[in-house]
Image (spheres, rainbow, N blue to C red):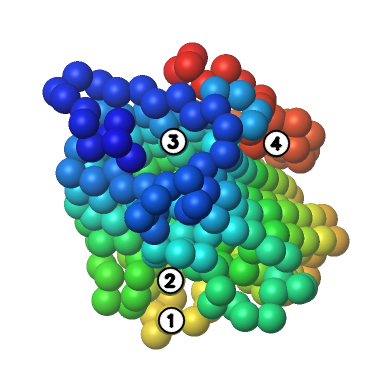
Amino acid sequence: QNAIKNKGTEPLTIFVNGTITPANSTGLSKIDVKETADISILGAGSGAEFNGIGIKIWKANNIIIRNLKIHHVNIGDKDCIGIEGPANNVWVDHCELYCTSPATQTNVDLYDGLLDAKGYSEYITVSWVYFHDHWKTSLVGSSDSDNYDRKITYHHNYIKNCNSRLPSYRFGTGHVYNSYYASPDDTGINCRMGAKLRIENNYFENFKDPIGFWYSDATGYWDVKNNMFVNCTGSQPTVSTCSFIPPYSYTLDAVADVKSIVTAGAGVGKIDPSIY
């Protein structure tokens, strides 16, 4: 936190080596990346960990969070990573985010999101992240009145044993591709309040309600392409309800290969975080 606070005008890279906790972060309920720009927080190896304290990005731009394990956050905003506008150009890559298995969590509000984006936040990429063992995974838009086009791309993420919000996406446009989803308790990709999501080449296995609309006054829409449903039940749409073409170039992995690619590559300790 001191490194962020004392940053000058030059870009700043912070390497984390060891475990950051509320106990060794005296007086802090979260790590604030606030009113700043051009900061990377990178895990130096596979042991870089935030245990019980999260990171909040707000009033900030050009931020990278990479190769960090963040878990069991129940202070501050209770998010492992929270992005709140105005914020733009944020990249979360090769992290591991988790709390407690939904099967054993008796208080669903003990923790909040693993990765939430709210308000005027935009141009966000979430890639190669291992989300697991959590209730409220990734909320986009804080309420049915939080109307903004956050323009988020989720790709090559591994989502396992998470109850819902995978993501829960209100308003605007988004792109979810080449991710592996395994064993949820409730619902998967939730398109709400007019959101238009391109959802393609994702692999869903042992999954209840992979793609659909729940829990808002108005539906969202999906442009579905070549998703794989293995031993799934409930809402598994193969017909699109909108058309959305992401405004950038990207390369799709074959959907049959997504499970092996993502389980091998997502999470911490898989890349050299200093190489972009």
Residue at coordinates 37% horizontally, 43% vertically from top-left? 124
Figure disc tally: 4
Where is residue 154 drawn, in percent x and y? 50, 45
Q: Amino acid at mark 2?
A: Arg
- Mark 2 vs 1, N-terminal side: 2
* 115 lies left or right of 205: left
Question: Which residue is label 4 attached to?
Answer: 262
Disc number for residue 192: 2
Give the farthest residue toward the bottom.
217
Q: 81 or 194: nearer the eye?
A: 81
State how far apart marks 4 and 3 are (Cα). 19 Å
Mark 4 touches mark 3? (CB < 8 Å):
no
Q: Indicate whether 209 appears above or below 181.
A: below
Rate crowding at label 1 as few (under 14), some (14 to 19) or many (20 or more) other CA atoms within 10 Å: some
Q: Amino acid at mark 3?
A: Ile
How far apart, in angstroms, are the residues tagged by discs 2 and 4?
A: 27 Å
Q: Are marks 2 and 1 in contact (CB under 8 Å)?
A: yes
Q: Is residue 12 above or below residue 29?
A: above
With 90 as the anchor, is 133 left or right in this view?
right
Query: In the picture shown, does residue 242 fall above or below 260?
Result: below
Give the mark nearest the N terminus, 1 or 3.
3
Q: Residues within 10 Å of mark 3 (few under 14, many from 20)?
A: many
As measured in the structure, the alpha-carbon distance from the residue carrying label 1 to the one carrying label 4 is: 31 Å
Residue 58 appears in the picture as rendered: yes
Q: Is residue 122 visible?
A: no
Please report contact status of discs 2 and 4: CB closer than 8 Å, yes or no. no
Cα–Cα gap, marks 2 and 1: 6 Å
Quarter of the N terminus within the rendering? top left
Residue at which label 3 appears: 65
Sequence-first tag of 2 and 4: 2
